[in-house]
Image (cartoon, rainbow, N blue to C red):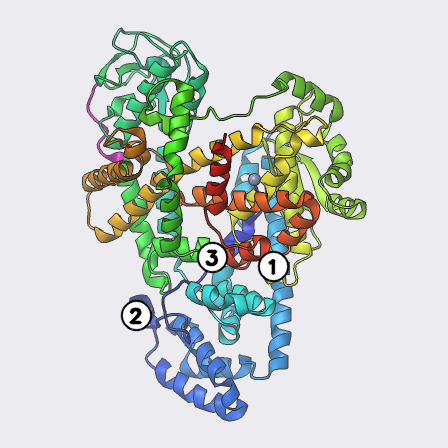
Amino acid sequence: MRFRELVVAVFFPAVVGAGTPLLYAFDMNTPANQENKPGWMEAAVAKLERELVAQGGEDVRTRVQRGLGQVASFWRAGDGTQAEFEEFVRRNFAADQKIRDTMFERFDRLFEQLDGHLQEIGREFRTQADLDIGPILPFDEMFAGYNAGAHVTDDFFGNKIAFVVLLNFPLTTLEQRLREGEQWTRRQWAEARLAQRFAKRVPASVNLAIAGAAAEADRYIAEYNIWMHHLINKNGNRLFPPKLRLLSHWNLRDQIKAEYSEPEHGLEKQRMIQTVMERIVLQTIPASVVNNPYVDWNPFTNEVTASTVRDAGEPPSAMAAPSSAPEPDTRYSVLLKTFLASRQLDPYSPTAPTLIARRFEEDREIPEARVRSMLEEVVASPVTAKVAALIQQRLNRPLEPFDIWYNGFRPRAKFTEAQLDDIVAKKYPTAHAYAEDMPNLLVQLGFDRERAAALAKNIVVEPARGSGHAMGAAMRSSKTRLRTRVEKEGMNYKGFNIAVHEMGHNVEQTISLNEVDYTSLQGVPNTAFTEALAFVFQAEDLRLLGLATPDEKAEPMRTLDDFWGTYEIAGVALVDMSIWHWMYDHPAATAAELRGATVDIARGIWNRYYAPVFKLRDVVLLGIYSHMIHSFLYLPDYPLGQMIARQITERIRKGGIIGPEFERMAKLGRIAPDLWMKQATGSRVGPEALLDGVERALRP
Ligand SMILES: [Zn+2]
């Protein structure tokens, strides 16, 4: 994982979307803009256009029209009178190209300073929370929760710096960036990113409503535990150990995966967990069993009784009587609230007027229709049946629905975890030892010695409180941080594996900030790209320990594992997408109606793409992901990330040496994802690399 967006993300509140005429990137007459638009605006804009063109010549007309249109669409009565508006435009429109160049360079530099210092404040304020350097006091958490950049966009509309940007630099639609972006110069891309900072002006009350709904959804999900020792089968037996508490859906799913290596009761336990999941989706789960270790539950009959087993202390005195009464559609009412809150932002987002459009056109910058067709290409691919047949053969039984989480394609380990721990602990007794060795590690990854030393010098290694993360800088004078966990006995293998992954982020962060031509373009198109680059490093971990010998079985197994995971999550993503469309089509729906729709959608996608492979119909498991409830249409990022990772890894591996290819890619900056991928690998984002890999892996 990485912490790069800590502050910066807040300051890139929005990106403009698609589907609108070129000259004005958006329609100025949306209800929200209409309401606040001063009556004098139209006349003032016409007058200023005549005036500025008379001064600057026909050449500037297009720029004048665009700038005036952009400023006018955001100017509210409270921003100033007609005279103040006119005065502002006359003073700040850069008719002369030289002045416009100077303006761009200064903004590029100053915003780097702003982002960079905000990032530094955020990093310092989180130090006690993030690093393993002693106890956290209550006020430390208050500092950690503070976001110095939260009001910057408001401030910049207030002091009118935002309007200077909007008057002189183009807001662009996704459609434009995709259609024309390939012909743009790097400077045009940088201007587009600069303007995007101010593509939205969302009232604080709307942001607050969304944050409120998100917090409620987070709380609902965070407390949704199933106490496994209290699940009983038809014989009254408890299959799971005491105290085991699994959070839905992550821990439940991972438990299904873990049970593949349990010959005794694995299959029975997997079936039981599947039933629990189905009841959560269908909301036939008894409300009294959620996060409650004082009742026993038979998930098959749905019978609930008071528990005689105490594995979580004594029950509270005022506990309700055990009951099979179902959870009252709370899952769907929480989801509905995130939708209703998101919809409040729609009128302030004229170019991406739904959350669906904002997710695809602004965040991912790949149109929804393309994402959908990429996902369908995976789930409808003929290789799914071949891989399924292989799994069936390995399991020696017909597939069951939960086998969408089959995880048996793992290369056999040559060393035990304990052996590896030993080797790593000797090599890296302290975090300092790892830091000292970084230049060598980078040389082994193919960077030349001088380059490796320079990169390592920009990475500060620190002891993490959690498992580890990378925190990038946002200005060139700051360093990136590699936070890693080192136990008293020295670093263990898991810690090393994570450190190498994070080091991949740190190297990407260093190159994509310090070496990029315009800091407005710093970074990579989105998280999937930096994760892919980090995985390239991580996959080399054994080689970096001097332990890897070529294993021709390992790679095909890894490919099959990646593919089966993508097949599963692509279906889940399609469900997520359909649910959001359904909510937009039925804005007045009740929670019960949303439950019905979700169940229909999950079954429909299963029946279309999974039933032919599993030979079973009407399964609802694709609806279990917690992200669907609390992550605002985030799930398509996972399968996209898999495709992107595969494309990048294959290209880098093809060259044999990681360093120079990694460096070339990391320098491309935050241009559109397809354009980045074309320049990096020769083709746009797509599932072909993954599907071809599976075909190869299946060959005998
Ligand atoms: Zn990561």
Q: Secondary structure at mark 2?
A: helix
Q: In the image, residue 189 lies at what x, y percent?
A: 55, 66
637, 612: nearer the viewer: 612
Q: Is residue 313 above or below residue 605?
A: above
Quarter holding ligand 1: top right
Q: Is mark 3 within 8 Å of ligand 1?
A: no
Q: Is residue 432 above or below residue 666?
A: above
| Residue tagged 3 | 13
Residue 547 appears in the rendering: yes
The 10 Å Cα crowd at callout 1, few under 14, some 14 to 19, many 20 or more, is some
Q: Secondary structure at mark 1?
A: helix
**Mark 3 against mark 1, which lies toward the viewer?**
3
| Residue tagged 2 | 35
Question: The disc labelled 3 sits on which kind of residue?
Answer: Pro
Q: In the image, residue 685 lies at what x, y percent?
A: 48, 52
Q: In the image, residue 26 lies at what x, y percent?
A: 38, 70
The residue sitting at 44% across, 74% down in the picture is 71
Rounded to the nearest whole Å, what is the CA distance between mark 2 and mark 3?
A: 22 Å
Rounded to the nearest whole Å, what is the CA distance between mark 1 and mark 2?
A: 33 Å
- When asked about the image quadrant of residue 460, the answer is top right
> Which disc, if any, is residue 114?
1
Disc on the earlier residue, 3 or 1:
3
Q: In the image, residue 455 lies at what x, y percent?
A: 73, 46
Are circles 1 and 2 on residues that touch, CB within 8 Å?
no
State which region is magenta: 323-330
The residue sitting at 49% across, 33% down in the picture is 699
Q: How would you classify the magenta stretch by its main secondary structure? A: loop
User: Is the N terminus in the top left, top right, bottom left or bottom right quadrant?
Assistant: top right
